[in-house]
Image: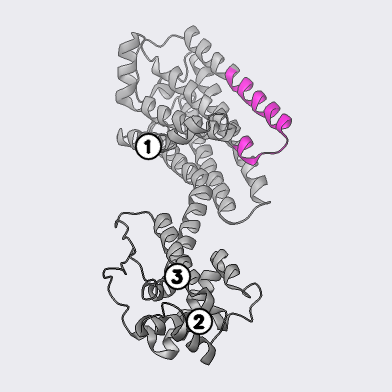
Amino acid sequence: MSSMYYYIPALLFLVSFAMRVPGLVRNWREPLVRSVAAVLALGAVVFLLAAPPTVSEVNRLTGVANFSAPLVHAVVTAGSASIINLMLTWRGGPEDRRLTATRWCAGAYAVVIVLLLALFALGDAPDERPRDFDTYYATSPYLREMILLYVLGHAVATVVLSALCLRWAREVAGLLRAGLLLIVAGGVLNLGYAAFKLLAVGARWAGHDWDAASTTAAPSLAALASLLQCVGFALPAAGQGLLEWWHRRSRYRRLAPLWETMRAVIPYELVPLPRWSSLSRRHLRRTCDIRDGLRLLAPYLEHGTGPAAERALAASPGALKPEAARHAALVIAAFDSLRTEPGDGGVETLIDSDDGLVRLSDAVRVMGVLSGVAKEPVPSPVAGQGLR
C-alpha cells in the first residue's frame, strides 16, 4: 500500500491542528478546545507513525526491532480515548457527570496502553516487519495478545463513540445531526478496519495467508474513516460559519440600492476602502454611510411624501441640488411606504435597526424601478462626494 495513504491524512490533520493553534492559545482553559486539539494532534501522529518509512526510521533510531508497533498501537488507543472524551465534552451536560465519564475513559485506556507496552516487552519480535507486523507475529506468544488487545480496544472505542453519536443525533437536527451521522459512518468503517484485522489474524491462526486484509484493506478503511469523522466534527461549526457568511453577504448586497442612492445625497467625501477589505468591514462601512445619509435626511423624512416633502427639500437651509433631491425623494417615498409596518414608525428606529435598513433598501429598489430613478446612473465620486 502506498505511503501516501498515511501521509496525506497526517497532513490534513496537521493543517487542521495548526489552524486551531491560535484559538487553543487564547482559550486553553476551555475543555472543548483542548479536546479538539488533542484529537487533531493525535490523528496526525497516528498516520505519521504508521507510514512504513516512518516505522523503519523509528525502529532504526530506537535500536529496537518493531518498536513502532506498540508505539503506533498506543497512540491509536490514546486517539480512541481522546475522541470519546471529545464527544462527551462536545455534548455537554452536568459538569461532574462529564468529568467522571472522561476520567473513567482516560483511566481505562491508559491501562490498555500499559498492557500493550508490557506485552510487547514480554514477547519476542526480532524480525522487522514495517507493513505486516500484526499478521507476521499473529501466532507469537504475548504479541498475539497485544495485537488482539489493540484491535478489540479500538473496536470497543468505535462502538462507544458511534452509540453516543446515534443517541445524540436523535435529539438534534440540521448540520449537527449531519455531522454526527458522518461520525457514525466513519465508525462503521472503523469497525470494518477492526474486522479485516481480526480476519487476517484469524487466518494466520488457521494456517492461511490473508495478509492483504490487514495490510491493504484495513488501512484504506482507516484513512477513509478518519476523513469522514474529521468532516463530521468540523461540519457543524464550519457549516454554521458558512451560513452566517452567506447571510451577511446577502444583507450586504441588499443594502446596495440604498447605499448607491445615498452616494448622490451625502455632500462630503467618502473615503474608499481597499479592494481586499473583509466582508465584515465593507458591510460596516456601508451601513455607516447609509446611517449618515439618513441622519441628513431625517428632517425631510418626517414630512413624508407629497408637496410637503418637496417644499421641505427645496426650502430648507443648504437645499439639495436637483439631482441629489431626486434621490432624496426616492428615499423619502420608500421610507413612507414602510410607515405602516410595526417598528418602523420613526427615523431613529430605522437607523438603529439593521433589519430596518435592509427593508428600506428593498423599498428604495422597488420605488426606483417604479419611478425610473434607478435607471439613472449614480454620479461618479468627485471632490466633496467620493465613494467609499
- Residue 37 rendering spot, x and y as whole percentages: 49, 32
Which quarter of the picture shows residue 341?
A: bottom right
Bin the neighbour count of mark 1 within 10 Å (Cα to Cα): few under 14, some 14-19, many 20 and up. Answer: some
> What amino acid is at disc 3?
Gly
Can you tell which quarter of the image residue 80 is in?
A: top right
Residue name at image x 52 percent, y 16 percent: 116
Figure check: 363 above or below 272 = below
> What is the total number of numbered labels drawn onto the structure image?
3
Q: Magenta region, mostly helix, strand or loop? A: helix
Say left or right for 248 vs 382: right
| Circle 2 residue | 332
Q: Which residue is mark 1?
A: 15
Q: Residue at x 38, y 86 (%)?
A: 373
- Residue 244 percent coordinates (x, y): 50, 57
Which sits earlier in the primary sequence, circle 2 or circle 1?
1
Q: Amino acid at mark 2?
A: Ile
Mark 3 secondary-structure assignment: helix
Sooner in the amino-acid sequence: mark 2 or mark 3? 3
- Classify the position of the C terminus by image quarter: bottom left
In the rendered structure, are the residues bearing label 2 and label 3 in contact, judged by CB atoms less than 8 Å apart? Answer: no
Label 3, residues with CA under 10 Å away: few <14, some 14-19, many ≥20: many
Q: Residues within 10 Å of mark 2 (few under 14, many from 20)?
A: many
* Magenta-tinted stretch: 87-110
The verdict on residue 89 being magenta is yes
Task: Please determine whether, in this image, residue 225 is positioned above or below residue 309.
Answer: above
